[in-house]
């Protein structure tokens, strides 16, 4: 299939704006040290980008760390450029990054450029799955019965599935989102019925967390499977209710702040302290970069308030041995209000 000449095919399955990245880098020092970082599922793509840039004369390194979203990128001082592959940069995360750093933002083709004062220049670059005709043919067959049932969905997608989503929207003659969603931000009014193009529950559940009455179907293009995510949402909701109930009974609370660039929220601390004092709870502020079970389960507190990514206090609850709630849960007038679970 013919897509923009600005996209380079990698490994026979992915399209990456390598020419745009190289053009941006060419304006700097050729001896610059570069760090290429990706989510775990795209490390093979990251390796190809490193090879490509090294062959062009740059000093590129591959990060072995996982990055969970655009909020989670490296600001290590000895890299002049960080090439962050595979995540969209939503406005809410950009606002947090802007509050933590002095920076300049610009865009070039499929790359968002964030120049951090006294830090690296971060290139947020897309990775797209290249649509394959055989998978699109299977998609058409799988979706035919779905559409014949009278369902008129709105097409949504995460960044890597953009090209697939546009092809499927053409097949179905269906309206499509103006841009990708993330796990914490949707840039358009949420309609009654969504057909999400992607894989896994993380992204499609965003719609349910923000608007529970929306019906959300997940279409996995690689398996040609359509699934209503409501049962998964209800399971997460039950875990959330239990976490809030257990938090209410906790005596000592750890308030976790994360140093990740798009998750660092010191502005929430004072309000949380005042709220916990009113609730009669003891508290300690804990500086922790990675809010994971390995760390949280061993903290000296009965419960934890998470000020980092709000999805930690939703998706990961079955992995914690103690209740974890989000700052938004604590600061709400009514903590039992579950109509919007992504309040920070």
Image: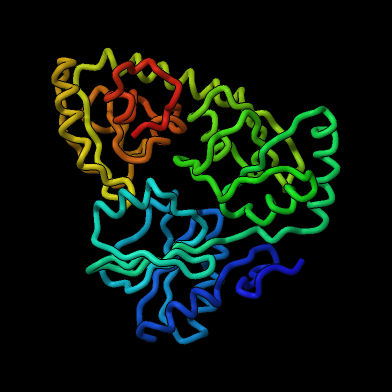
Horizontal and vertical percent position of residue 275: 19, 22
What residue is rendered at 58% in x and 37% in y? 204
What residue is rendered at 32% in x and 40% in y? 308
Horizontal and vertical percent position of residue 194: 64, 35
What residue is rendered at 44% in x and 50% in y? 90
Residue 104 vertical placement versus 330 (above, below): below
Q: How many marks can you see?
A: 0
**169 or 146: nearer the eye?**
169
**207 or 39: nearer the eye?**
207
Q: Quadrant of the N terminus?
A: bottom right
Which of the 4 image quadrants contains residue 282?
Answer: top left
Q: Quadrant of the C terminus?
A: top left
What residue is rendered at 68% in x and 50% in y? 165
Horizontal and vertical percent position of residue 202: 54, 38
Horizontal and vertical percent position of residue 283: 16, 26
Which of the 4 image quadrants contains residue 162?
Answer: bottom right
């Amino acid at each position: 299939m013919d897509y923009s000449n600005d996209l380079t095919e990698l490994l026979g399955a992915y399209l990456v704006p390598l020419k745009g990245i190289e053009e941006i880098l060419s304006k700097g020092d050729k001896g610059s040290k570069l760090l290429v970082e990706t989510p775990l599922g795209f490390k093979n793509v990251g390796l190809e980008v490193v090879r490509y840039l090294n062959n062009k004369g740059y000093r590129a390194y591959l990060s072995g760390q996982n990055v969970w979203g655009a909020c989670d990128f490296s600001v290590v001082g000895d890299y002049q450029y960080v090439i962050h592959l595979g995540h969209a940069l939503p406005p809410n995360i950009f606002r947090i990054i802007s509050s933590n750093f002095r920076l300049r933002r610009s865009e070039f083709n499929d790359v968002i450029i964030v120049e951090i004062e006294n830090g690296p220049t971060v290139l947020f670059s897309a990775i797209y799955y290249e649509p394959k005709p055989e998978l699109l043919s299977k998609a058409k067959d799988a979706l035919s019965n779905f559409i014949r049932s009278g369902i008129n969905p709105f097409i949504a997608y995460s960044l890597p599935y953009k090209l697939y989503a546009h092809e499927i929207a053409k097949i179905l003659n269906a309206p499509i989102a103006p841009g990708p969603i993330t796990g914490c931000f949707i840039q358009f009014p949420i309609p009654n019925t969504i057909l999400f193009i992607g894989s896994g529950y993380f992204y499609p559940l965003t719609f349910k967390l923000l608007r529970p009455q929306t019906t959300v179907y997940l279409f996995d293009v690689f398996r040609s499977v359509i699934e209503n995510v409501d049962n998964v949402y209800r399971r997460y909701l039950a875990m959330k209710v239990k976490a809030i109930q257990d938090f209410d009974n906790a005596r000592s609370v750890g308030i976790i702040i994360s140093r990740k660039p798009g998750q660092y929220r010191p502005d929430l601390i004072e309000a949380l302290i005042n709220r916990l004092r009113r609730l009669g709870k003891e508290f300690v502020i804990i500086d922790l970069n990675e809010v994971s079970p390995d760390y949280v389960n061993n903290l000296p507190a009965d419960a934890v308030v998470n000020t980092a990514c709000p999805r930690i206090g939703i998706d990961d609850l079955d992995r914690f041995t103690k209740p974890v709630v989000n700052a938004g849960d604590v600061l709400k007038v009514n903590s039992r209000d579950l109509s919007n679970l992504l309040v920070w």
